[in-house]
Amino acid sequence: MPQRVLSSELPAHVGETVLLRGWVHRRRSLKSVSFLIVRDRAGLAQVVMPEPVETPEESAVAVVGTVVANPAAPAGVEVVKPTVDALAAAETPPFELFRPDLAAGLSTRLDAAPLAFRHPGTRTALETAAAATRGFRTALEKSGFTEIFTPKLVATATESGANVFPVDYFGRTAYLAQSPQFYKQLMVGVFERVFEVGPVFRAEPHDTGRHLAQYTSLDAELGFIEDHRDVMAVVREAIAGMVEAAAPGLDVPIDIPDIHFPDALRVAGARPDEPDLSPADERALGEWARREHGSDFLFVTGYPMVKRPFYTHPDPADARWSNSFDLLFRGVELVTGGQRLHRHGDYLAALAARGQPVEPYRSYVDAFRYGIPPHGGFAIGLERFVARLLGLANVREATAFPRDRTRLEP
């Protein structure tokens, strides 16, 4: 049996007998000849058949044949005199995967996700996510960060809200982690700079094109900072690394423009007493950043303390505002981050001011008795990044098996 050759490698094997393995992408029968288009992980290969092909599309096959030059074929070569062995016959797919565009609605594609993602165009989102994650890791490792892996079963809701998924944990209640926030802060006391790539879970009752109940969060935390602007500088490097790996043509400004929250409300035309930005406000700010600064990215800084978690560091000059930020990407919130409290007494005071008991956070708060330095961090939503980068209308198109209010399968 010849050694397997990928479709992209065929031009280097003209005149040789090779083994192709892949799926039947398309069958074409003309008056005098038939073709089998085989798809493997590297692309497409044309196989010239002596008679019409009976093997159904999407069947897994092994093809042994001779490579010959043909300028009209994909990559300028094709396989002739083939022997085709059907490894696993396929039933008729619910949509035609050989079409340039997948003619199926989003719900249909998600129901048949393992099949839909075989389409080269649809698969692009997953390939982009993989590249962006690789770029994130590379950028942070170059800056002295250590990758960590934290629990996804936790005893306390990280964000102090009700949007958590409870789990029966040997007779007591645990929760799926909303964020690695507490753990990455504590690990600053070990490595100083840490990051994590992993799933997070939000039981938010949203049914929009930008929310998921489970998504991939790219998190980082760094110690010995002056304030949140040190964190923003690392965000820029992380985003630049992701863009370089996934979409090298996109410009990430060296100095991403930023705007303070009250000014952002004014630019967006929102009421001056609004405590947060609406999706419409974010879109307006994205248009403003593109128009005024030529940038797809915009930092909004100094969100009101009332809208940020208890561990957020207030602005020393005005405690109404926080040393926090969001990064908007093409008019959608992509990154949330900021400076955290780092003294034990400040945590006790912050919880008391919000009327929250210390006990549920005891193991977290107690760690600040032992010299955690001034620090801050951020989290990037991977699926949102991919969706905005590729211009996808719905974040569900940027993940293989989305989880939302109604979807728990496949």
Image (cartoon, rainbow, N blue to C red):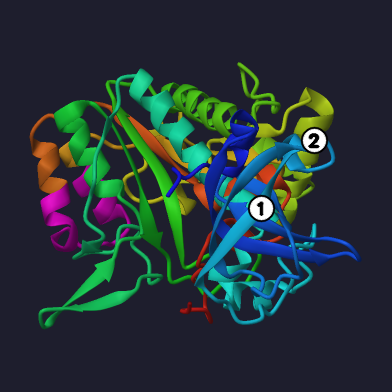
Question: Compared with residue 36, is residue 46 higher up or lower down, i.e. above or below?
Answer: above
Question: Compared with residue 44, is residue 159 higher up or lower down, i.e. above or below?
Answer: below
Circle 1 Cα neighbour tier, 10 Å, few/some/many (<14 / 14–19 / ≥20): some
As drawn, the label of residue 291 is none
Find the magenta span and give its range. Answer: 346-364
For the point 8% across and 33% down, which residue is it?
370
- Type of amino acid at the residue the image marks with label 2: Trp
Report the side of 28 relative to 47 (left or right): right
Name the residue nearer the viewer: 361 or 380.
Answer: 380
Q: Position of residue 266 (x, y in %)?
A: 75, 41
Q: Is residue 331 visible?
A: yes
Q: Which residue position holds label 2?
A: 288
- How many numbered marks does the figure carry? 2
Q: Secondary structure at mark 2?
A: helix
For the point 84% across and 41% down, which residue is it?
72
Q: Which residue extends farthest top?
A: 254
Name the residue nearer the viewer: 223 or 302.
Answer: 223
As drawn, the label of residue 81 is 1
Q: Which residue extends farthest right?
A: 31
Question: Compared with residue 144, is residue 206 higher up or lower down, i.e. above or below?
Answer: below
For the point 69% across and 71% down, which residue is it?
106
Name the residue nearer the viewer: 297 or 143.
Answer: 143
Report the side of 58 relative to 291 (left or right): left
Q: Position of residue 155 (x, y in %)?
A: 18, 65
- Rendered image quadrant of residue 34: bottom right
Indicate yes or no whether the magenta region holds residue 361: yes
Circle nearer the viewer, 1 or 2: 1
- Type of amino acid at the residue the image marks with label 1: Lys
The numbered mark, 1 or 2, whose residue comes first in the sequence reads 1
